[in-house]
Amino acid sequence: MAKIKQNNYVLFFYNDSKKWLAKISKNEQLHTHIGVIKHSDAIGKEYGSRLVTNKDKYVYLFEPTIHDFVMKIQHGTQIVYPKDLGYIVARTGLTSGQKVVEIGTGSGSLTSFLAGIVRSRGHVYTYDVEPKFMKIAEKNIKKAGMSKYITMNELDLKKAKKLPHSEVDLVVVDLGDPWNVVPQARKMLKGSGGFVAICPTMNQLEKLVSVLVQNEFSDIECTEQILRHIEAREGKTRHSFRGIGHTAYLAYARKAFFGKKSAKKSRKVKTKTVSKNKVYSSKK
């Protein structure tokens, strides 16, 4: 049985809209509308147990998942929501041991989620140009326990003269102008490697896809993930009036080889042969 210890993280769960993520410290107390939750009362208990507050309300002691960390982290920028995170992993086939490059660290939520998938043999290399946001992301990544599997870099890959990686499995882009790093992403990816970009608007999506085609990407797919919560109660189940609406559009593509170079070479050879025939015919 996993027992809660000092410095462990615990999700104090009351209901779906009232839950608190905390690092256990025996001298700390959490003051809420349902009463005072003493950290010391959680120490030694098994995850899944429950505590009773001084207002006779109870909370469950859950072991936080990466989903909990993503939803409870400090937001310096807009986060990528779990409904989108799940689809990214499913569509790309991301798995343990793979190498990922992320362009645009943001708050570190996507970074942490990706690291949680590729660990313990894989690694995520993330790049950003905003020191302020990177400090927030570093704190969030550490909180999620993913520091070991993530390398953070302050570098603008748009301007990089030499790209730091090659033969990576996946490049994920979370920028306002993702099309500007498509050529760089292509150079870093292995053949058939995956590319994913998070786009807030359809205009961005349209421009991005055009550039992806120009840079010889195929299997291009653009999606929006819609998630509806259901309030399941005996005799009166219905969809929830509370929910998350539009968050982002996702663009997925794979590095391909269109054969443009070989086609050009073939045309040149054919033209040269025709030219010789014409000259020969002229002399004859």
Image (cartoon, rainbow, N blue to C red):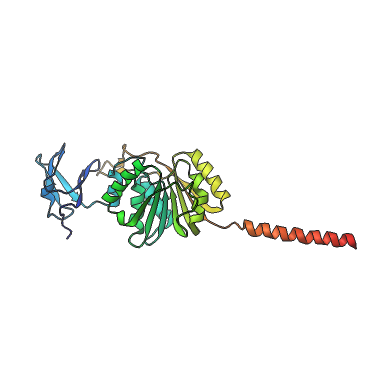
Closer to the camera, 80 or 239?
80
Q: Position of residue 178 (x, y in %)?
A: 48, 44
Q: Position of residue 262 (x, y in %)?
A: 64, 60
Quarter that holds the C terminus: bottom right
Q: Residue 268 lies in what quarter of the image? A: bottom right
Point 38% across, 38% down: residue? 245
On screen, residue 251 above or below 190 = above
Q: Position of residue 251 (x, y in %)?
A: 47, 47
Closer to the camera, 166 or 73?
166
Give the total number of marks visible in the rendering: 0
On screen, residue 96 above or below 66 = below
Point 48% across, 56% down: residue? 188
On screen, residue 74 above or below 48 = above
Q: Position of residue 46 (x, y in %)?
A: 15, 55
Q: Is residue 74 left or right of residue 9?
A: right
Quarter that holds the N terminus: bottom left
Q: Is residue 109 left or right of residue 28?
A: right
Q: Residue furthest front?
A: 161
Closer to the camera, 265 or 225?
265
Point 67% across, 57% down: residue? 264
Q: Residue 93 lies in what quarter of the image? A: bottom left
Q: Is residue 187 left or right of residue 72?
A: right
